[in-house]
Image: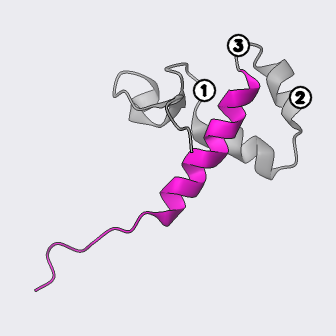
Amino acid sequence: MDIDRITLDPAVMGGKPCIRGLRVTVGTVLGLMAEGVGRERILSAYPYLEPEDLDAVLAYAAWRLEEREEDLTAA
């Protein structure tokens, strides 16, 4: 899984996960995909994105869904 294209920077989009430091969030692209917008249309709307960026968005979302948060305050 290659998620190196996903960056987190507090100075860019409030620290939300973005694609290669650009002002395009993972959530934006994932939302478009969920709405059924095709890859080619997304790439046309954001010409600075590459097909590998869309793959990274999906890989990152899948990875985040597998994370577990532990309650460290529980005894």
Whether residue 20 is visible, yes or no, is yes
59 shown above or below 7: below
Q: Which residue is mark 2?
A: 41
Q: Circles 3 and 2: CB distance less than 8 Å? A: no
Q: Secondary structure at mark 1?
A: loop
What type of secondary structure mainly makes up the magenta span? helix
The amino acid on which the numbered mark 1 sits, given as a three-letter code, is Val
Say which residue appears at 59% left-offset and 56% top-offset.
62
Q: Secondary structure at mark 2?
A: helix
Q: CA distance from mark 2 to mark 1?
A: 15 Å
Mark 1 packing: few (<14 Cα in 10 Å), some, or many (20+)? some
Q: Circles 1 and 3: CB distance less than 8 Å? A: no
**First in residue order: circle 2 vs circle 1:** 1
Say which residue appears at 43% left-offset and 23% top-offset.
12
**First in residue order: circle 1 vs circle 3:** 1
Q: Position of residue 29 (x, y in %)?
A: 69, 37
The amino acid on which the numbered mark 3 sits, given as a three-letter code, is Tyr
Q: Position of residue 55 (x, y in %)?
A: 69, 38
75 shown above or below 55: below
Q: CA distance from mark 3 to mark 2?
A: 13 Å
Which quadrant of the figure contains the C terminus? Answer: bottom left
Residue 32's quadrant in the figure? top right
Along the line of sight, the residue nearer the viewer: 74 or 63: 63
**First in residue order: circle 3 vs circle 2:** 2
Along the line of sight, the residue nearer the viewer: 51 or 23: 51
- What's the magenta region? 50-75
Query: From the viewer's perspective, is 71 left or right of 3?
Result: left
Q: Which residue is mark 3?
A: 48
Q: Which residue is mark 1?
A: 24
Q: Position of residue 4 (x, y in %)?
A: 49, 31
